[in-house]
Image (cartoon, grey):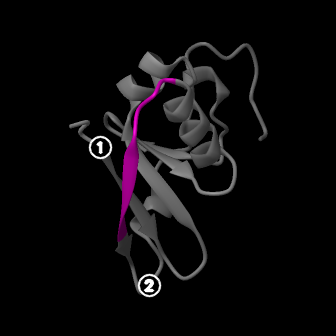
Amino acid sequence: MTKKLKIKFYQDPGHGWVAVKRQLLKDLGIEDDISIFSYTKGATVYLEENSDAHKLSKALEKAGIEFELVTVFHRERSPIRSYPSYYSEGWNCFKWG
C-alpha cells in the first residue's frame, strides 16, 4: 500500500498556503520556481495557493507521489502573512510570479 504524503493547507478568510519543507522543493527540482508571494519560516515554506501550490502539485504528480491536504483554518489574519517572503539561493533575479 502506498503511503500518502500529508500536507497542511493553512487558510485565513482571504488566502491560503500549503506548508512543506524546503528540502522537498529541492528534491522535486522546483526550489527556484517558487515566487516571492510564498513565505518561509525556518525549514518550512508556505506556498501561496494560486500559483506555487499548483507547481508543487504538478511536481508531486510527475514524481508519482500521492498526497492529501489537511486544512487548518484561521478565523483571523494568519500569522503566515508576517513571515519573510520566499527566496531561493538559485535565483539570478527576483521572480514575480
Q: Was residue 43 drawn as part of the magenta stretch in this picture?
A: no
Q: Is residue 16 left or right of residue 78?
A: right
Q: Label 2 amino acid? A: Glu
Check the picture and name the quadrant holding the C terminus: top right
Q: Earlier in the sequence, mark 2 or mark 1?
A: 1
Looking at the rendered structure, the secondary structure element under dot 1 is loop
Classify 10 Å Cα crowding around label 1: few (below 14), some (14-19), many (20 and above): few
Q: Is residue 44 left or right of residue 51?
A: left
Which segment did they paint magenta? Answer: 63-71
Which quadrant of the structure image shows residue 70? bottom left
Residue at 41% x, 86% y: name it.
Answer: 75
Q: Nearer the viewer, mark 2 or mark 1?
A: 1
Where is residue 42? Give x, y as percent.
31, 37
Q: Was residue 65 drawn as part of the magenta stretch in this picture?
A: yes
Residue at 42% x, 17% y: name it.
Answer: 27
Task: Say above or below: 25 vs 12.
Answer: above
Question: Label 2 to label 1, Cα distance in Å?
Answer: 30 Å
Q: Which residue is mark 1?
A: 4
Considering every residue shown, the one lying at the far front of the view is 1
Residue 4 or residue 82, whichever sits in front: 4
Considering every residue shown, the one lying at the far bottom of the view is 75
Residue 88 or residue 84, whichever sits in front: 88
Where is residue 93? Give x, y as percent.
76, 20
Residue 77 or residue 17, whichever sits in front: 17
Q: Which residue is mark 2?
A: 76
Q: Label 1 amino acid? A: Lys
Please give the label number shown on residue 81: none
Total labels: the figure holds 2
Where is residue 65? Give x, y as percent.
41, 32
Looking at the rendered structure, the secondary structure element under dot 2 is loop
Classify 10 Å Cα crowding around label 2: few (below 14), some (14-19), many (20 and above): few
Check the picture and name the quadrant holding the N terminus: top left
